[in-house]
Image (spheres, rainbow, N blue to C red):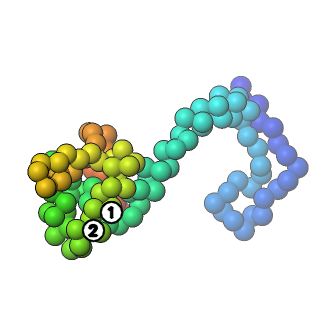
Amino acid sequence: MKVYKLSEKVIKQSNKETCDTFCYDEEVVLRVQPEIEKVEGVELIFKALSDATRMKIAYALSIEKELCVCDVANIIGSTTATASHHLRLLRNMKLAKYRKEGKLVFYSLADDHVHQLVSIALVHSKES
């Protein structure tokens, strides 16, 4: 049997997106609250991908396994300096990796997890 602790505070009824009465399941809160620490820093991944240009780059890298900085610049319609800036940020966030071949620099997604994030976000955005 669940025991709910009720407070005396009643939320305004005009806002239908919240409970009319403030209460919580103490057992659930005590079980979940310590686990919340695990998400620390994860928001930085989403912050990096929340930029439209970086998301386009990540998506392009999910289509092609590897792209030269010059290819990325042409794909997104920017200068190589702009493309390089965004690629460097993705690399610093461990979302992309690079390799040099002579004077060329090639980028790819860091791993399949990043590919999955991009793919899932794309599928989710298409749902109505």
* Residue that appears at 70% across and 30% down: 30
Rate crowding at label 1 as few (under 14), some (14 to 19) or many (20 or more) other CA atoms within 10 Å. Answer: some
Q: In which image quadrant can residue 114 be found?
A: top left
Please, which residue is most extreme toward the front here? 102
User: Looking at the image, which is closer to me, 56 or 79?
Assistant: 79
| Quadrant of res 36 | top right
The structure residue drawn at horizontal position 82% and vertical position 56%, both measured from the top left corner, is: 10
Q: Position of residue 116 (x, y in %)?
A: 29, 44
Q: How many marks?
A: 2
| Residue at the outermost right position | 8
Q: What residue type is labelled 2?
A: Ala
Residue pointed to by mark 1: 85
Q: Give the image location of residue 71, x and y in percent.
A: 14, 63
Kindly identify the residue that appears in the image at 72 percent across and 68 percent down. Answer: 14
Left or right placement of residue 70 versus residue 97 in this view: left
Query: Residue 89, can we see it?
Result: yes
Quadrant, the C terminus: bottom left
Mark 2 lies on a secondary structure that is helix
Distance between mark 1 and mark 2 Cα atoms: 6 Å
Question: Which amino acid type is shown beneath numbered disc 1?
Answer: His
Q: Residue 81 carries which label?
A: 2
In this rendered view, identify the residue nearer to me: 104 or 58.
Answer: 104
Q: Which of 90 and 126 is in front in this view?
A: 90
Q: Where is residue 39 in the image (x, y as percent from the top left)?
A: 53, 40
Lateral position of residue 46 relative to residue 3, left or right = left
Image coordinates for residue 48, horizontal then vertical, percent = 41, 56
Mark 1 near mark 2, Cβ–Cβ under 8 Å? Answer: yes
Residue at the spot x=73%, y=40% of the render? 24
Quadrant position of residue 77: bottom left
